[in-house]
Image (cartoon, rainbow, N blue to C red):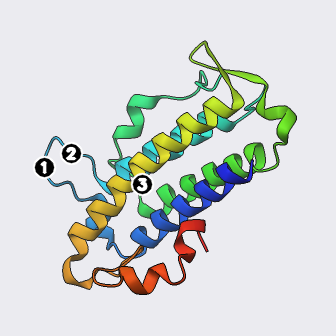
Amino acid sequence: MNVFVAEYRRYRKLLEGALAQVSDDNFFRRLDEQDNSIAVILNHISGNLLSRFTDFLTSDGEKPWRNRESEFRVEGMTRTALMEKWDRAWKVLEGSVFSLGPQEMQKVVTIRGVRFSVEEALARSLAHFSYHVGQIVYLARHFSGTAWEYLTIPPGQSEQYNENPDKEKGI
């Protein structure tokens, strides 16, 4: 279980490091009409985590109360409200997943009626989460321009980093 916990935490650190560098205007800004804003992506991953991990072992991961389509509309929402939703989603993830033991990893859960081992469901969730965190980091870096503070290895510092590769473990 530690592998999943460490990776979720590592991506959370990247996500929140990127969000900290974005103004409120850029939080809601889209590159064009077809693209999602950081706010939309955060709303979507929050909704996804809330649905997947509420009653994780005992109910389908696609909850009847989830309205996935509404996650892509943030008009009238505030950054504060979206950050509160993100905090709730993280707490649900932590409470449902971070204490699972080896026996629970072999259990079966369903997502949209499809059966997955807990391990498979977590791998899928982590891939989805990291994909969207990457989108947020990319947008935040784009909007921050030269003020961007690197969240991973800065250009020209690979050798120095390789002497103590602490970021690989989310430290």
Residue 85 locus on image (x, y percent): 56, 52
SS label for mark 1: loop
Contact (Cβ within 8 Å) of mark 1 with mark 3: no
> Seen in the image, is 155 located left or right of residue 9?
left
Q: Position of residue 128 (x, y in %)?
A: 46, 40
Location of residue 125 in the rendering, given as x and y in whole percent from the top left corner = 55, 38
Residue, disc 2: 35
Marks 1 and 2 in Cβ contact (< 8 Å): yes
Between 148 and 123, the one nearer to me in the picture: 123
* SS at mark 3 in the image: helix
The residue indicated by pointer 1 is: 32
Mark 1 is surrounded, within 10 Å at the Cα level, by few (under 14), some (14 to 19) or many (20 or more) other residues, namely few
Q: Earlier in the sequence, mark 2 or mark 3?
A: 2
* Residue holding disc 3: 133
Q: Work out which residue is located at the far top of the displayed protein and give it.
A: 113
Residue 11's tag is: none
Q: Is residue 26 left or right of residue 109?
A: left
Q: Quadrant of the C terminus?
A: bottom right
Residue ID at (46%, 63%): 15
Q: Amino acid at mark 3?
A: Val
Q: Position of residue 35 (x, y in %)?
A: 21, 45
- Left-right relation of 87 to 36: right
